[in-house]
Amino acid sequence: MLRLFGTRLAMTIPLLLVVSFLIYSLIVLVPGDPAVALAGQNPTPDQIEAVREKLGFNDPFLLQYWHWLTDAFHADLGKSLFTGEDVWSSILSRLPVTLSLTFLALLLAAILGVALGLVAGLRPGSWIDRLATVGASVGVALPYFWVGMILVLLFAINNPILPATSYVGLTDNPFEWFKHLIIPALSLAIAPMAVIARQTRASVATVMTEDYIRTADAKGLTRKRVIAKHALKNAAVPVVTVFGIEANRLIGGTVVIEQLFVLPGLGQLAYQSVFARDFPMVQGVLLFTAALILLINLIVDVSYGYFNPRIRKA
């Protein structure tokens, strides 16, 4: 497992460098000059040029990127152009909100999706299987924001039992934390839950037709033992792959959900920074998000070694 982790990590670091270059390049090429906004109302060309010189915008592109990258390695992502707030501090202050939302959504999607797919996969062709398949197809097609608005209408407006906006920290009040996040998390969880359910159903149904399952049945093992010891572990590899993909999608989906439910997370910070043309903040959030996604992919890759021992020897 350590060898597998080292190999995957060695592949991840160069990829992160490439992603960082793309992030910096795309942001710099975005139309609009923040120096014009920072120079005040009706600035003169000399004032704009002075701001550009102060911020280093006149340096060659590769030199700007090198300074930004080396600073990033020292946890210095610069300061906001408009508020002067440290970018790294802003990210860390908003990170718990996004992680809480993503974690709860993933937990709901994994539990409900695997359970639904397992029940359907063990009874292929049954009414439960057909119902689960139709439900999963509908769930995949539902947009995050539409599900969120329907849940708000049902549980916050027509039946005011859950709050529709704001956030309470987990350490402040765990019950209120859950209460404030359950609607946003469900909004995010519906689509990945449907995808996980479909993949689990397909994997379990395929594994249950394999020869080693019939051999285990012939040995007199109980059905529960056959499923738990042989079927689930072998069916888990494609499910874990889908889980990793959906985790990455959820991170992107937080931009919409945090705006909809007024949650002060990274998604809301990125949205506000883009419209304000706050380049250092946008670059910092994108770089951090990219690193988080690569970390998730690394964890998924390493987990293959647990479910399939042959991968450890590759």
Image (cartoon, helix red, strand yellow):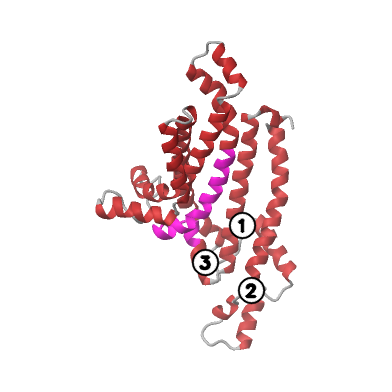
- Above/below status of 107 relative to 180: above
The boundaries of the magenta stretch are 240-269
Q: Residues within 10 Å of mark 3 (few under 14, many from 20)?
A: many
Residue type, mark 1 in image = Leu
- The residue depicted at 54 percent of the width and 30 percent of the height is 204
Q: How much space separates mark 2 and mark 1, taking CA atoms?
A: 20 Å
> Residue 303, how many percent across, how many down?
61, 35
Residue most extreme to the left: 159
Q: Are marks 2 and 1 in contact (CB under 8 Å)?
A: no
Q: Which residue is mark 2?
A: 55
Q: Secondary structure at mark 3?
A: helix
Q: Quadrant of the N terminus?
A: top right
Residue 224 placed where, x, y %? 48, 19
* Residue displayed at 58% across by 80% down: 36
In primary-sequence order, the first of circles 3 and 2 is: 2
In this picture, residue 287 sits left or right of residue 173: right
Residue 169 got which mark?
Answer: none
- From the viewer's perspective, is 56 left or right of 245? right
Q: Amino acid at mark 3?
A: Ser
Reply above or below: 78 against 183.
below
Q: Position of residue 314 (x, y in %)?
A: 74, 32
Reading the image, the residue beneath label 3 is 273
CA separation in Å, label 3 and label 1: 14 Å
Image quadrant assignment for residue 302: top right
Which residue carries the number 1 mark? Answer: 287
Secondary element at image label 1: helix
Give the percent coordinates (x, y) of residue 293.
59, 49
Q: Tell me if label 3 and label 2 are in contact, CB under 8 Å.
A: no
Q: Earlier in the sequence, mark 3 or mark 1?
A: 3
Residue nearest the viewer, comparing 70 with 250: 250
Q: Main secondary structure of the magenta part?
A: helix
